[in-house]
Image: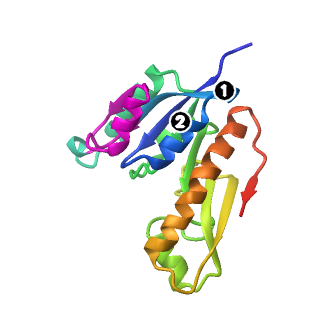
């Protein structure tokens, strides 16, 4: 029997979703974290990962001055060196090219703060409020070359309240993100792509 799947997690900030994933990968979980990587050396999540005993790496996008293929070639190296079986994007704020995605297609996940296919891209909470939506939430999906596209593996829903601001809505969605992403990863690492819906 082979050991647990190895998971590399890519972050750009505080890494709260990364922490929820890492904390879930214990006991009989079919995966373990092998790497936390960021495009920003100041990302708060790197210290949290190091404190948890997980290898970290930084590939700063800025020296590449828009040469995304060179940046992604460097980004690939630590992931491959760590032997990652699964790549989880957890607040990684760089758009990845088709070349990078295709290397990991079928084993790369992302969490997005909207009920896809609604509100791909940024400012999802403000857009849900502007549209007068009754509910909002988050989606975990497989990553494909199209932005915020790919097979949906799970969604979690929250009601939109009358006095919500983008910040209050974001905070309620984040609570659900921290439940949904670990639940999807656990199934995915076990080879189960059955969709999960939380409310």
* Mark closer to the chain start, 2 or 1: 2
- Looking at the rendering, which quadrant does residue 70 occupy? top left
Q: How is the image coloured?
A: rainbow
Asked if residue 3 can be seen in this view, the reply is: yes
Tell me residue 63's x, y (percent). Answer: 20, 41
Q: Is residue 7 left or right of residue 95?
A: right
Is residue 53 covered in magenta? yes
**Residue positioned 45% across, 51% down in the render:** 91
Is residue 40 covered in magenta? yes
Asked if residue 141 can be seen in this view, the reply is: no
**Residue positioned 69% across, 54% down in the render:** 154
Q: Which residue is mark 1?
A: 27
Q: Is residue 139 above or below residue 144?
A: below
Span colored in magenta: 37-61
* Element class at badge 2: helix
Tell me residue 76's x, y (percent). Answer: 42, 31
Q: Residues within 10 Å of mark 2 (few under 14, many from 20)?
A: many
Q: CA distance from mark 2 to mark 1?
A: 12 Å
Q: Which residue is mark 2?
A: 22
Give the residue at the far top of this rendering: 1
Tell me residue 84's x, y (percent). Answer: 53, 26
Looking at the image, is mark 2 or mark 1 nearer the viewer? 1
For the N terminus, which image quadrant? top right
For the C terminus, which image quadrant? bottom right
Q: Is residue 45 above or below residue 148?
A: above
**Residue positioned 38% across, 34% down in the render:** 75
Q: Residues within 10 Å of mark 1 (few under 14, many from 20)?
A: few
> CB under 8 Å between callouts 2 and 1?
no
Q: Is residue 11 above or below residue 30?
A: below
């Amino acid at each position: 029997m082979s050991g647990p799947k190895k998971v590399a997690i890519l972050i750009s900030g505080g890494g709260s979703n990364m922490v929820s994933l890492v904390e879930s990968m214990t006991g009989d979980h079919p995966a373990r974290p092998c790497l936390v990587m960021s495009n920003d050396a100041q990302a708060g999540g790197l210290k949290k990962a190091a404190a948890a005993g997980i290898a970290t790496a930084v590939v700063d996008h800025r020296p590449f001055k828009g040469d995304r293929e060179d940046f992604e070639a460097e980004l690939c190296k630590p992931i491959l060196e760590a032997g990652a079986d699964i790549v989880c994007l957890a607040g990684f704020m760089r758009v990845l090219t088709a070349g990078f995605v295709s290397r990991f297609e079928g084993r790369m996940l992302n969490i997005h703060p909207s009920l896809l296919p609604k509100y791909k891209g940024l400012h999802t909470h403000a857009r849900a409020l502007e549209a007068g939506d009754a509910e909002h939430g988050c989606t975990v999906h497989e990553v494909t070359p199209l932005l915020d596209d790919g097979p949906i593996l799970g969604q979690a829903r929250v009601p939109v309240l009358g006095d919500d601001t983008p910040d209050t809505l974001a905070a309620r969605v984040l609570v659900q993100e921290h439940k949904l992403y670990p639940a999807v990863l656990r199934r995915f690492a076990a080879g189960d792509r059955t969709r999960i819906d939380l409310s």
